[in-house]
Image (cartoon, rainbow, N blue to C red):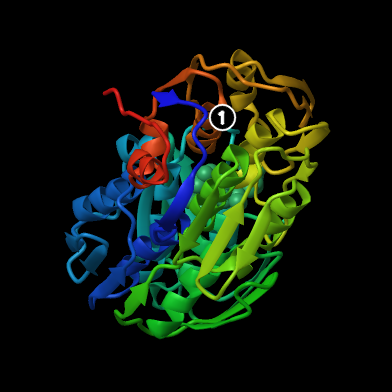
Amino acid sequence: MIQGGNRLYGEITISGAKNAALPILCASLLTETPLNLSSVAALKDIDTTIKLLDIMGVKITRNADKVSLDASDVTSFEATYEMVKTMRASILVLGPLLARFGTARVSLPGGCAIGSRPVDLHIKGLQAMGAAIHITHGYIQASTLHLPNRRLQGARYYMDLVTVTGTENLMMAASLAQGTTILENAAKEPEVVDLADCLIKMGAKIRGAGTDVITVEGVERLSGTDHNIVCDRIEAGTYMVAAAMTGGEVKLLNVQAHLLDAVIEKLRDAGAIVTVDTETITVKGDGQLKAVNIRTAPHPAFPTDMQAQFMALNTVASGVSKVTETIFENRFMHVQEMQRLGADISIDGNTALVKGVEFLDGATVMATDLRASASLVLAGLVARGETVIERIYHLDRGYENLEAKLNALGANVKRLS
Ligand code: EPZ
């Protein structure tokens, strides 16, 4: 429950990136010596991944943001439907299992609220590396036992869509393959780069992470290492929008501004004052923002994971704006909920037309997916009166201690159950 109208002031520390921690946790499967991680955020999706790895036999100790993983005795090479249906990123065990053990049985992720989100490019990439893959009874059954030394073979593979977890799965698989793999049209997201940095410390030979061609020279084995997870640029962006919308002044700590160029640019276009330092970003809003056009695309363009948050900003900014979603086919489910708050939005295909209104009025709304629920929190912070958001388990998947962080900045947010 949110009482709207409070400006946000103060400092907030950004947590480690969910979307870097998920693949890096799965990278523990690639070696029999311990992988020690820090800045692992306390998020539901992280709990789910740790549970999945634990079931597979990985010995895991966790203390605050520190997680140590020992995959010296993996007993199961399977990710069941029960696990995968709660979190599609479980697909990230497929590459590592195949690379190290030559066998994997991973449930196909079902549909997802924001789109069909197939994993065909993950599968085609592994097949290009020689894996035998059959889809039976909703499971991906994969094996390399027919290959020389039972090892994946290096290959050149062009991904005809930019896929973040696809790039990550194939990069992990290639790191232990026989020979060299070249991934073309690779995703350039900072979380891909962070995974590559960790794999390189584990002994992988990877060049080009962060560009659209990644070259991986397979090695015989990898070893554990220590790695600090990169900051969560989407969590940071979400709080930056909150500061701009409420007309306050918030300083974010433990954040790297160069990961957020497109978001910072758009906030400045909207009239917020954004100042950056090596590890901090400060956002100052005067409460009256200008509407900004948004078009999502792969990094370094404007991130799809910030689309809903900027839609919230546009609902109360002055002017008309267009928000175009090019990555997922159904990532506008926050629109109907915002209309309940009084927003003026019309949808035409993958573009939403937003006309700024004077005020939003608090109401009861429903969260549908992670970033949509974050955008409803933002709308509730500025809406007149009380907003109640239902199904906030979506929020807990990607935002650590959201209400504590917001209340520390002067918001009035209560968790009802
Ligand atoms: C990652 O999802 C993120 N999740 C998503 O963040 C993010 O929205 C997305 O990348 C885009 O940036 C994690 O990293 C765990 P994709 P991912 O593969 O990898 C299509 C959040 O809010 N596609 O880059 O699943 C796909 O349908 C989450 O934290 C295929 O067609 O996304 C989509 O339209 C939500 N076939 C597009 O590509 C494939 O084999 C991009 O998807 C793979 C993808």
Three-letter code, disc 1: Val
Q: Residue 332, located in which quarter of the rendered image?
A: top right
The quarter of the image holding the C terminus is top left
Judging depth in this view, the residue of 241 and 372 nearest the camera is 241
Residue 154 lies, in percent from the top left, at 56, 76
Residue 120 lies, in percent from the top left, at 59, 47
Q: Residue 291, located in which quarter of the rendered image?
A: top right
Left or right: residue 167 versus residue 344 is left
Check the image and report above or below for 214 versus 311. below
Judging depth in this view, the residue of 325 and 93 nearest the camera is 325
The reply to whether residue 131 is visible in this rendering is: no
Which residue is at a point 49% across and 82% down the rendered structure image? 218
Q: Residues within 10 Å of mark 1 (few under 14, many from 20)?
A: many
Left or right: residue 284 versus residue 98 is right
Residue that carries the numbered disc 1 in the rendered image: 382
Which residue is at a point 64% across and 23% down the rendered structure image? 335
